[in-house]
Image (cartoon, rainbow, N blue to C red):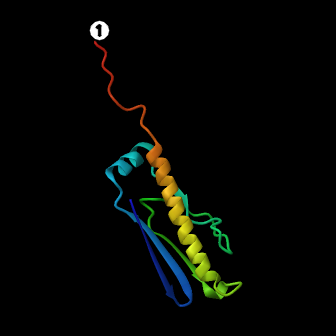
């Protein structure tokens, strides 16, 4: 899986766009077997604000986009710091759910033959 982060500043808003792509066949198969993982693209991310919960699927609901407006800063630099913290948190959450998905093993599937 590839995680791409694009950052931009437009009209005093620090925006972050994080997308997922290029899932391996093993990842795709694991999602078919065990379900597509989700992350919370909101909540507490270590910034100066908490965002509303935003449960998103890692494949079908990508990209994950968030903006932080400098006009909402309590102290100068909050928007940039929040954008950086949010980006790091989302990437970390994506990596964690994919690690969990990849750790799943299919103990059920297969063929059993009994010769009698």
The residue under label 1 is 116
Instruction: Report whether residue 21 is seen.
Output: yes
**Pointer 1 local density, CA inside 10 Å: few below 14, some 14–19, many at least 20:** few
Left or right: where does residue 66 sit relative to residue 50?
left
Q: Residue furthest left?
A: 115
Left or right: where does residue 81 sit relative to residue 60?
right
Q: Quadrant of residue 85?
A: bottom right
Q: What count of labels does the image hold? A: 1
Residue 23 coordinates in the image, percent (x, y): 36, 57
Asked if 4 appears above or below 97 in the picture, the reply is below
Residue 54 coordinates in the image, percent (x, y): 57, 64
Q: Quadrant of residue 2?
A: bottom left
* Label 1 secondary element: loop
Asked if 10 appears above or below 19 in the picture, the reply is below
Asked if 11 appears above or below 86 in the picture, the reply is below
Question: In what quadrant of the picture does the N terminus appear?
Answer: bottom left
Q: Residue at x 62, y 63 (%)?
A: 53
Residue nearest the observer in this picture, 12 or 4? 4
Q: Quadrant of residue 114?
A: top left
Residue 101 coordinates in the image, percent (x, y): 46, 48
Q: Residue furthest right?
A: 74
Question: In what quadrant of the picture does the C terminus appear?
Answer: top left
Left or right: where does residue 65 sit relative to residue 108?
right
Instruction: Report whether residue 56 is seen.
Output: no
Q: Residue at x 28, y 12 (%)?
A: 115
Q: Residue at x 57, y 71 (%)?
A: 86
Q: Residue at x 30, y 19 (%)?
A: 113
Q: Residue furthest top?
A: 116
Residue 90 coordinates in the image, percent (x, y): 53, 65
Asked if 93 appears above or below 101 in the picture, the reply is below
């Amino acid at each position: 899986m590839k995680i791409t982060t694009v950052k931009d500043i437009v009209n005093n808003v620090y925006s972050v766009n994080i997308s997922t792509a290029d899932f391996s066949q093993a990842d795709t198969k694991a999602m078919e077997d065990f379900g597509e993982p989700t992350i919370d693209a909101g909540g507490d991310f270590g910034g100066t604000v908490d965002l509303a919960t935003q449960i998103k699927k890692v494949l079908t609901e990508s990209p994950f986009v968030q903006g932080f407006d400098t006009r909402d800063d309590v102290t100068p630099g909050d928007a940039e710091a929040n954008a950086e913290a949010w980006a790091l948190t989302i990437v970390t959450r994506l990596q964690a759910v994919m690690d969990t998905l990849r750790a799943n093993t299919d103990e059920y599937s297969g063929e059993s033959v009994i010769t009698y």
